[in-house]
Image (cartoon, grey):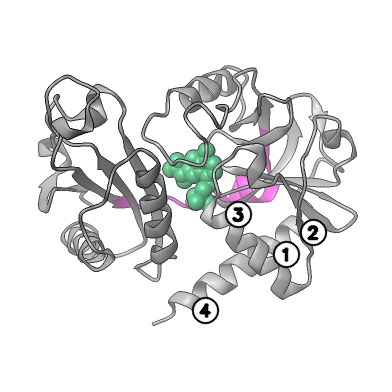
């Protein structure tokens, strides 16, 4: 099964996919991205991902020069050239493009659009059944007046540093606090706890990425009668949480059973988490069924 990359409209094998070292995406980390997955081989919630990509781009003074239709047709062409069957992982990168070594955006007239397509790997059943340990990292989630976490930026050094700590601690994910010490999100996913049957997740104003899956889980909760509320969370909330879970495009919903040495609830994936995961999958199937 090939991993193919669409570089500015040309479909290439992974080994031949290059961009210029003068692309400011490489040089300065100036770019934005989206991770999309397919259900029933259809890019899931594509419109929402594109509108977030455009919102992210706008915040770094970058414009995607292509229509959603063009981007979708490039994704589909790349998928069809590479993956015969099964679901796809799609990483869409929009960078500043090539130019002289200066921070002046006018030096780069043409943004680069890269689409990486490879097989989607689902979360192993063992993880779904047993849950994961996450580690509360000392790496702080960026201040909104720095590289705003609302921007899904290619500039991922802060997230990488947080994950390095988590890996050292044998954890699956890195849970991060904002500059006020509130829990906000993980390095690669959004964060929820469950208390009294209600799922709680930090509000956007606390400084986090507006996850497409996070929003989808709020909708699923409404539909299946599980209240989901946005509220600021503190470390002490981990002690009283009955359940916790993380959400992302590629991982859907993953139960969290421990945060470092703190056991969450019974130490097993909880009923609310399981109900939301099954609701999410059902709704994803309904929305993509041919
Ligand atoms: N990560 N928060 C951060 C910091 C993320 O990087 C992600 C996504 C999320 C969840 O967003 P969504 O539900 O839209 O996937 C939250 C993707 C999957 C990635 O980095 O590949």
Q: CA distance from mark 4 to mark 2?
A: 22 Å
Mark on residue 286?
Answer: 4
Label 3 sits on residue = 214
Q: Which residues are magenta?
A: 118-133
Q: Residue at x 79, y 59 (%)?
A: 271
Farthest bottom residue in view: 290
Q: Earlier in the sequence, mark 4 or mark 1?
A: 1
Mark 4 or 2: the one toward you = 4
**Relative horizontal placement of residue 125, taking residue 225 as reference (left or right):** left
Q: Are marks 4 and 1 in contact (CB under 8 Å)?
A: no
Relative image position of residue 270 (x, y in whole percent) = 79, 53
User: Which secondary structure lies at badge 4?
Assistant: helix
User: Which one is earlier in the sequence, the residue at label 2 or at label 3?
Assistant: 3
Looking at the rendered image, the disc whose residue lies closer to the viewer, 2 or 3, is 3
Instruction: Say whether disc 4 or disc 2 marks the residue closer to the N-terminus.
Output: 2
Foreground disc of the pair 3, 4: 3
Sooner in the amino-acid sequence: mark 3 or mark 4: 3
Q: Nearer the viewer, residue 67 or 118?
A: 67
Instruction: Name the residue beneath numbered marker 1.
Output: 275
190 relative position to 54: left or right:
right
Residue 157 occupies which quadrant of the picture? top left
In the rendered image of this protein, does residue 92 appear above or below residue 226? above
Residue at horizontal 59%, vertical 63%? 216
The x, y position of residue 286, in whole percent, is 52, 79
* Mark 3–mark 1 CB contact (< 8 Å): no
């Amino acid at each position: 099964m090939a991993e193919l990359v669409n570089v500015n409209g040309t479909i290439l094998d992974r080994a031949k996919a290059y961009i210029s070292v003068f692309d400011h995406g490489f040089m300065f980390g100036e770019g934005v991205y989206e991770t999309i997955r397919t259900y029933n081989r259809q890019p899931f919630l594509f419109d929402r991902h594109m509108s977030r990509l455009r919102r992210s781009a706008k915040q770094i003074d970058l414009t995607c020069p292509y229509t959603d239709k063009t981007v979708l047709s490039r994704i589909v062409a790349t998928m069809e050239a590479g993956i015969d069957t099964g679901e796809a992982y799609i990483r869409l990168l929009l960078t500043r493009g090539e130019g002289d070594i200066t921070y002046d955006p006018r030096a780069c007239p043409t943004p680069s659009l890269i689409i990486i397509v490879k097989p989607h790997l689902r979360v192993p059943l063992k993880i779904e059944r047993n849950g994961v340990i996450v580690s509360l990292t000392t790496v702080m989630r960026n201040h909104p007046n720095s590289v705003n976490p609302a921007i899904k930026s290619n500039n991922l050094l802060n997230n990488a540093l947080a994950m390095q700590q988590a890996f050292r601690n044998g954890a699956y994910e890195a849970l991060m606090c904002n500059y006020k010490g509130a829990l906000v999100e993980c390095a690669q996913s959004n964060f929820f706890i469950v208390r009294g049957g209600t799922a709680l997740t930090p509000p956007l104003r606390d400084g986090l990425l507006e996850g497409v899956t996070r929003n989808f889980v709020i909708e699923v909760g409404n539909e299946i009668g599980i209240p989901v509320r946005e509220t600021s969370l503190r470390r002490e909330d981990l002690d009283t949480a009955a359940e916790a879970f993380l959400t992302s495009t590629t991982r859907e919903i993953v139960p969290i059973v421990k945060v470092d040495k703190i056991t969450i609830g019974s130490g097993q994936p909880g009923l609310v988490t399981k109900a939301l995961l099954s609701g999410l999958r059902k709704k994803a199937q309904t929305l993509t069924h041919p």
